[in-house]
Image: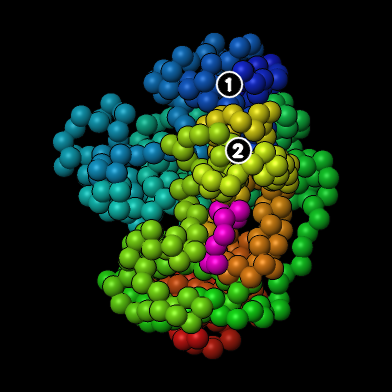
């Protein structure tokens, strides 16, 4: 294949820490190169060097045979290199059409012209988006698809995608893969970063394993498997864990009765026991996101009732939820914007009075233990959170909520951007938390995660809760059937609507 990018002995530092320690990498036209590594391995820094947002200290790069070393993202874009960062942001007031063509030579055209071109682009790729809709009305996964369309519109020759599929459900990942294959058929090259090892095997031609700032190994995707990739990443076998097939036996902590939110959610009823991990899943427009936000007080419900420990609870805002000991980790956690030290990010807020040196030492030991268990890559626990990788910021946010005194903890995509080793740790910590009696509501688009972690899984479709599946009686195929409304081959009829 025709070599497009070659990087040799790249060194780079961030916040006085040496991150890249001699990276060598090559990408060919028409190739998808998968890039995997644990949080803090240097993936995002490397992509920043390639895309012009981060300067390297040593090493050389060539692009299409020419010396390459962009001083800015604009220069990289002019050279044909485009990046979708892990924590991308789009102006919420932009229409989808304007967002797709922003930063390109066509950005100055009228909305009518942009709309027509965006409509054709959306139609050709097969994504269901309205070019007139504002980006602010889209959920995170849909915004990721807009960013992919922007790469197509930019006509980038090298497209770098950093954890773009982290919060996409499996069927949307399939759509994304279709777009990527279309791009490489046009002769473009893609560097694709993901923590989903099964996904990277299915989409990439080759897989580069980044470990401690160096490319440890490059494998042919067709000649490896998930177990080998996991071992190369972690340098140890995954322990694995048993599915929680027995029902949670605690008393009822949360009950939702005929909950509604305008036309997004209709008459949803379910309960969660103390010590239960209750999963929720659904497509973008299923109402599952609105349901979770209603429980967390982000957007109040318009009908129905919520009961906590058998008593009616009025949740009209996040302050109400907090007062009622309901914690909420949104799927936007870990994005740039939070400030403060890592210690302050992990440990619960201390009371002004009553703290002493012994308590402070105990808390710092607890923070250090969390950092060790969750494999957060840092040399200074008092350093700023912004010095951490995106995945490690997500871990900090998750650890903070797990340390709070919540009766109900609602988590939206808690493992987004977290490497496979840390996922096992997160599950162990959630299990330990549930054993103390905390009821956990877990929204995830990762079906294997739901099956591995949850006692029961509720599936939303078209604004309704169509089924609640006990772990022992379900699998990923069953959940997909219910999510998409497809009948079982056995002829059992449509997914049932559950009221329990």
- Give residue 83's position: percent from left, percent from top: 47, 32
Q: What number is the disc on residue 15?
A: 1
Question: Looking at the picture, does residue 252 appear above or below residue 298?
Answer: below
Count residues near mark 2 (Cα–Cα under 10 Å), then give few for <14, some for 14-19, many for 20+. many
Question: Looking at the picture, does residue 255 appear above or below residue 476?
Answer: below
**Secondary structure under the numbered disc 1 in the rendered image:** loop
Residue 488 visible: yes
Quadrant into which the N terminus falls: top right
Q: Which residues are magenta?
A: 401-408
The residues tagged by marks 1 and 2 sit, at their Cα atoms, a distance apart of 17 Å
In the rendered structure, the answer to whether residue 209 lies left or right of residue 151 reads right
Q: How is the image coloured?
A: rainbow
In the rendered structure, the answer to whether residue 122 lies left or right of residue 36 reads left
- Residue furthest to the bottom in view is 492
- Give residue 14's position: percent from left, percent from top: 59, 21
Residue at which label 2 appears: 343
* Residue found 25% across the figure and 31% down from its top: 107
């Amino acid at each position: 294949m025709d070599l497009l990018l070659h990087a040799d002995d790249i060194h780079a530092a961030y916040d006085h820490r040496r991150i890249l320690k001699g990276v060598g990498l090559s990408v060919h036209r028409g190739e998808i190169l998968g890039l995997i590594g644990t949080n803090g391995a240097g993936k995002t820094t490397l992509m920043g060097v390639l895309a012009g947002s981060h300067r390297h200290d040593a090493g050389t790069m060539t692009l299409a045979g020419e010396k390459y070393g962009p001083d800015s993202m604009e220069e990289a874009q002019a050279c044909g290199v485009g990046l979708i960062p892990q924590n991308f942001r789009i102006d919420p007031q932009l229409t989808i059409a304007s967002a797709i063509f922003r930063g390109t030579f066509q950005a100055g055209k009228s909305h009518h012209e942009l709309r027509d071109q965006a409509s054709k682009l959306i139609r050709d790729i097969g994504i269901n988006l309205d070019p007139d809709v504002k980006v602010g009305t889209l959920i995170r996964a849909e915004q990721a698809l807009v960013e992919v369309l922007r790469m197509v519109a930019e006509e980038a020759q090298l497209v770098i995608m950093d954890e773009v599929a982290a919060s996409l459900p499996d069927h949307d990942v399939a759509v994304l893969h279709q777009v990527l294959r279309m791009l490489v058929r046009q002769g473009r090259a893609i560097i694709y970063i993901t923590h989903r090892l099964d996904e990277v095997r299915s989409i990439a031609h080759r897989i580069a394993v980044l470990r401690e700032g160096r490319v440890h190994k490059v494998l042919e995707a067709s000649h490896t498997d998930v177990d080998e990739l996991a071992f190369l990443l972690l340098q140890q076998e995954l322990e694995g864990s048993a599915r929680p097939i027995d029902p949670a036996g605690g008393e009822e902590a949360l009950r939702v009765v005929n909950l509604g939110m305008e036309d997004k959610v209709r008459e949803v009823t379910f309960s969660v026991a103390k010590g239960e991990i209750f999963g929720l899943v659904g497509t973008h427009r299923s109402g599952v996101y609105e349901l979770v936000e209603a429980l967390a007080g982000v957007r109040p419900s318009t009908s129905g009732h919520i009961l906590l420990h058998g008593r009616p609870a009025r949740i009209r805002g996040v302050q109400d939820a907090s007062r009622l000991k309901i914690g909420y980790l949104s799927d936007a956690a870990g994005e740039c914007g939070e400030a403060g030290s890592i210690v302050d990010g992990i440990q619960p807020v201390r009371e002004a009075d009553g703290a002493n040196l012994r308590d402070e030492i105990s808390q710092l030991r607890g923070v250090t233990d969390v950092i060790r268990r969750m494999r957060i890559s840092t040399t200074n626990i008092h350093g700023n959170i912004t010095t951490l990788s995106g995945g490690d910021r997500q871990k900090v946010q998750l650890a903070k909520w797990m340390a709070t005194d919540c009766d109900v903890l609602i988590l939206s995509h808690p493992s987004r951007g977290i490497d496979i080793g840390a996922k096992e740790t997160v599950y162990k910590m959630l299990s330990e938390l549930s054993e103390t009696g905390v009821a956990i509501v877990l929204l995830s688009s990762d079906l294997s995660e739901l099956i591995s972690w949850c006692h029961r899984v509720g599936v939303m479709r078209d604004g309704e809760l169509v089924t609640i599946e006990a772990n022992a009686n379900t699998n990923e195929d069953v959940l997909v059937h219910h999510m998409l409304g497809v009948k079982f081959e056995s002829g059992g009829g449509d997914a049932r609507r559950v009221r329990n």
